[in-house]
Amino acid sequence: MRSLGTGFWVAVALAAVGFLVVPTLILQSPIEPNMGFVQKIFYFHVPCAIMMFLSTFVCAGGSIAYLFRGSERGDRLAVAAAELGVLFGVCTLTTGPLWGRKAWGVWWQWDARLTTSLLLFLMLVAYLLARRYGGPAGRKLAAALSLFAAINVPLVYKSVDIWRTVHPKTTVVTTLDTRMRIAFWSSFLLITLVWTVLLIIRMRLERARAELAALRLDAEDELAEGRP
Amino acid sequence: MTTMTAAWKRIRIAAVAAMAVVAWTGTALAQEFEKVENIPRQEIPAGRFVSIAYGIIWLAVLAYVVMVAAGVKRVNQELADLKRKVDRTGLKG
């Protein structure tokens, strides 16, 4: 594998600094009067959910490039983004119930936001399963599936405004107190950096796998030609 | 015809009686609830929940990094194996 660029290492360094600074900012932010200390889960639960949305859009973008232009790079981007969507989906769907248990008294509610989020997560899992076990057409099948997942994202986002739900509304971020806003946006920046770093390394791994497969084919061809 | 009408009448009476019994039992059970004032609220330690949530995120990220690193290691190993195979057979790289 080729060496990673300076930008990558700057992002890694910033993420490491953020790992130390962000929890301090979150702890120093004011306590929300209704929910109390547990509201602090919000500072990393929401960025994780946004990363799941972003991953889905990136996956769909890469899939479009692959489906309509046959771009292998687009396919690599799509698979890396789908994996990150699942990763941040796990984070969202585990931190949410922890917050809900304390704030609502239950781990899970089958309300619009939670159910559509779970569906989005399952669609991303289905994308990876289709690639893995879908046979020769698996990659194309998965790419098409990712388009449906992308359509689901606006529905997940707007679900709290369309239906009556126990989940906080989308306006909550814009109404934050200044110190809460600093903590939120710094946490968002940190998680975005982590997402970017992971996307880069995962894409590079996929490219290395593709190069290895091509080399193996070349070697097999040459071996076949070299045989008496 | 008369037999059918009589049978339907009996069924209706039985259904109304069954509903009355169920309604009476429900009311009786509901009346057994007692209203209690000033119950201490169940306190769940919020700090623990916040720490677990934060820990889950970083553990998940770490697990993913380990998974990708294992993938890189496997690719490098396979590349070395292929190179060795090519060298052994004397093919051009």
Image: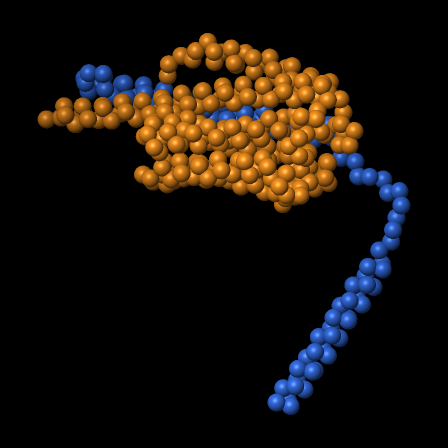
Chain colours: A orange, B blue
Between A111 and B92, the one lying in front of the other is A111
Q: Looking at this rendering, what residue extends furthest in the right direction?
A: B37
Q: Nearer the viewer, residue A197 or A57?
A: A57
Percent across and percent down for residue B50 are 69, 28
The image shows a total of numbered marks equal to 0
Q: Position of residue A14 (x, y in %)?
A: 56, 12
Residue A69: image quadrant is top left
Which residue occupies the extreme bottom position in the image? B2
Above-or-below relation of A26 to A45: above
The picture quadrant where one finds residue A17 is top right
Q: Quadrant of the N terminus of chain B?
A: bottom right
Q: What residue appears at the point 32 percent right and 30 percent down from the top-left corner?
A: A70
Looking at the image, residue A203 sits to the left or right of residue B21; the answer is: left
Position of residue A21 measured from the top left corner of the image (x, y, whole percent) = 65, 14
**What residue is shown at x 66% (from left), y 82% (from top)?**
B8
Image quadrant where one finds the C terminus of chain B: top left
Q: Is residue B66 above or below residue A127?
A: above
Most extreme residue toward the left is A228
Residue A43 located left or right of residue A227? right
**Residue A170 visible somewhere in the drawing:** yes
Name the side, left or right, on which B52 lies relative to B78: right
| Residue pictured at 18% horizontal, 23% vertical | A222
Instruction: Find residue A99 and report its image quarter.
Output: top right
Q: Is residue A148 left or right of residue A93?
A: left
* Residue A114 visible to an observer of this rendering: no
Please state which of residues B48 and B10 is positioned toward the viewer in this rendering.
B10
Give the image location of residue A83, x and y in percent.
Answer: 47, 30
